Image (tube, helix red, strand yellow):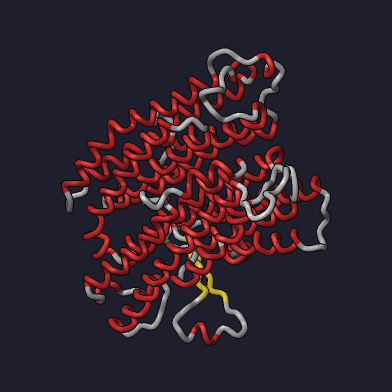
Amino acid sequence: MDIFLSVPFLIFMPLLVSMFLISPLFTRNEIIVRRFSKGVFLFHFLYTLLMLACFDSANPYTSEIHFFGLDWIQSMGVKFIFKIDSISMIMTVLTSFVFLLASMASKFNIRTNHKFYYSMLLLLMSSILGIFTAGDMFVFFLFWELELIPAYFLIGEKWKGGKCSEGNTASPEQKSAIKFVLYTFLGSMVMLLGILLLHYYNFISSGVLSSVFTDILSSKIPDSIQILISICLLIGFGVKLPIIPLHTWLPDAHTNAPTPVSMVLAGILLKTGAYGIYRFNYEALPDAFLKIAPILAVFALVNIIYTAFAAYSQTDIKRIVAYSSISNMGLVLLGLCAINKLGVSASVFHMAAHALVTCGLFMAAGIVYLRFKNRDINTLSGVAAVMPRLFGFTMVIVLASIGVPAFAPFVSEILTIISALNADFSDFLKFAAVFSLPLLIVSSCYMLKFLHKSFFGELSYEYEKVNDITVHEFIVLASVLAGLIIFGLYPNAILGMIG
């Protein structure tokens, strides 16, 4: 069976299909483009499940690619190595699944330029898979930067049609895309400085000229240099996570991006920041991370507190979900700061649980906007009267998001708090764990507020003939709900892999 399993194929197949899809060789017929693209996403997900079924944590998938003419790169210790361990495997399956859901959600949300849209979606998936599987620091950075190209177009284009901005005036979508690129690019430059410093001092201290993660011997690097490198890396990853005050690009990007892109941004893109902190700061620089963790836990707590109240003050459904995403990523960061196995398990599990929740909530917000052309909860009411199936799905997903037992977020939230309480090196982690408990009540308030104002109340007569969810929308919401229930009742499916 191993002969059919290839890490490079898993990563680069979407990239090759993207190039073929955007080329003149492929038809412009939107129905064929849409069905072909969904078929590719489905095939990739099934291939990922096959790799998961054959996965052995004691023998991770490893592959090295040799390109013609790359001797000058290899002479600097850079190797195109890809490795899928337990955590990478979980994130790879999650990435493939979320992109499959996003492709299905695109049917009614994308109205124009289908070839370009699906090619960018495939390119984005390929770059994110490269981030989650890179075994070399510079290969990681290569995919980290590659992701900017498709993300810019996916956020900034008018996929529903309409007139472009005239003159030099940028549209809201373009402004959001530019803001995202500037934040990420500037953070990436600081992160690159950290990678270069780590590469240099690793060579000076150990005599090993290599940027492969397994060759980094940080214990021989002076503590002050380790801390400086950790801070540089955290700034880059903090933009993507995001960590306050580096978060302001996120609400705007979510508000102006189409529903499928919002699903990918919140479901997967934010997780690349947390994964980078785990792979670089937690694994490669453990001594420095042990010293920085209490300070980083302060930022995690600020993430949870500030954005919870910010979400409550919002009226746009997508902005509510966007701010709730930042709050939830604070929980992921808090779990990593605990610096124990339970904390890592809780963080990875919460990344998966949060991805499912945000996919469901953004899908619901997108469906409401498609039918009512409105996302303002102050003027929107009575949705449940004409869309009972949507109301049923949304209500259960909202209950899952606030941590009701039997759903996946409940497990990850409890494990995060327990892991922080068990952090022996800092009393502040225990304080943060105790203080974060009442904040879960705030998340219940803004989610239930959104549910109550949007779905209850009097329905305007002009919306009395609005149709309920379609088959495509039903499949997406049902898939999200199934995942939340399965991992809520059987969390060991993920926790067992992490160990």
Q: Up-down: is 282 above or below 73?
A: above
Q: Residue furthest front?
A: 167
Quadrant (top left/top right/bottom left/bottom right) for the N terminus: bottom right
Provide residue 400's location: percent of width, then percent of height.
45, 30
Q: Residue at x 48, y 26 (%)?
A: 450
Viewer-closest of 269 and 78: 269
Against 322, residue 119 (above or below) is below
Q: Where does residue 56 sit, x and y in percent of width and height?
A: 47, 58
Query: Measuring 45% from the left and 63% from the top, which residue is drawn there?
Result: 186
Q: Position of residue 227 (x, y in %)?
A: 26, 67
Kindly identify the residue that appears in the image at 49 percent across and 77 percent down.
79
Q: Is residue 327 left or right of residue 78?
A: left
Q: Nearer the viewer, residue 317 or 75?
A: 317
Total marks in image: 0
Q: Does residue 364 sit above or below 106 in this rendering?
A: above
In the image: residue 209, left or right of residue 139: left
Where does residue 154 sit, x and y in percent of width and height?
A: 62, 52
Residue at left offset 22%, top offset 42%: 421
- The answer, for residue 340, to whether it is visible in the render is no
To which quarter of the image does residue 291 belong?
bottom left
Res 295 visible: yes
Eyeballing the image, is 110 above or below 400? Answer: below
